[in-house]
Amino acid sequence: MVIGIITVMKKTNPSFLNGVPELLVLRLLARQEMYGYQIVEEIRTRTGEALAFGEGCIYPYLHYLEAEKQVSSRRQEVEGRNRNYYKLTARGRKRLDELTSEWNRVTTGVSLLMEERRA
Amino acid sequence: MVIGIITVMKKTNPSFLNGVPELLVLRLLARQEMYGYQIVEEIRTRTGEALAFGEGCIYPYLHYLEAEKQVSSRRQEVEGRNRNYYKLTARGRKRLDELTSEWNRVTTGVSLLMEERRA
DNA sequence: TGACAAGCCTCATGGTTATAGGTATTATCA
DNA sequence: TGATAATACCTATAACCATGAGGCTTGTCA
């Protein structure tokens, strides 16, 4: 019988973005102290909009990273606005290294299969 | 068993694999007709185990792709075993092109931010 | 006044891989 | 012979995570 069981998989945006926000947040914070809103804008502008993660993605990550002690934060008032500045800890640095090699492993693997094969 | 309420985010495999199986399956089928088991093995061996998707991942994809008319299939008995051979349709070719440019967009974007920044 | 940017936050939804099973046939090897 | 691995197919469930929409506040500019 079996008509149904169509396993929907609706296919909107597969997008290859799984884990990318974490990688980029750690990478940016490895260079300099930054605050959340700045990270969101930086990713958007520096990639020419190729990548654009919403605040709803970045903020929860920052909270998670802080809970995991991969980043530390301090609050500072600048021109009447409160900013939470984050910077990488040693633990975050280690995590960044892991994620970076993971990223390289995946992209290398994909490249191997994407290349045209000659005879 | 639920101990915390700590917003778990368990962090096992961020892995960057979102959408990769679909991209690779389409790419492989663009080159030649293949059957499911062969695809699983091909990905595993050709990447030197860097990428290895289980059958439980690939088979549902093939069924989905067929339902979407991105691939067509034929069944053939080979050496006493039944194989379902799949090949790309024009629609699948188009989808592959979309995914490929999406992949390039993402990896390019990530590269922009991962690079060391000088001065 | 109204609109918009800066700056922070949360939650529900839904898509997709991973895990862990399941069936059946054939090949290999002790 | 019996056991195990390899071939070849399949499904259901859980875990994960970006999206999108919402909300709050202060400051700026018209």
Image: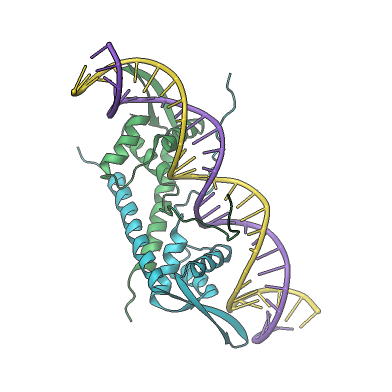
Chain colours: A cyan, B green, C yellow, D purple
Front one among B90 and A16 = A16
Q: Residue at x 39, y 62 (%)?
A: B110
Q: Is residue A20 visible?
A: yes
Q: Residue at x 47, y 72 (%)?
A: A42
Residue at the extreme bottom: A79
On screen, residue A51 versus residue D27, left or right, reads left
Which percent across, then down, holds residue A68?
48, 66
Q: Quadrant of residue C30?
A: top left
Q: Image quadrant for the C terminus of chain B?
A: bottom left
Q: Is residue A10 visible?
A: no
* Count of residue discs: 0
Which percent across, then down, holds residue B49?
29, 44
Q: Residue at x 50, y 63 (%)?
A: A52
Q: Quadrant of residue A101?
A: bottom left
Which percent across, then down, holds residue A116?
27, 44
Residue C14 lies, with reference to residue A46, above or below; the image says: above
Residue B78 lies, with reference to residue C2, above or below; the image says: above
Front one among B117 and A100 = A100
Q: Residue at x 38, y 58 (%)?
A: B107
Residue C27 lies, with reference to residue D18, above or below; the image says: above
Which percent across, then down, holds residue A46?
44, 70
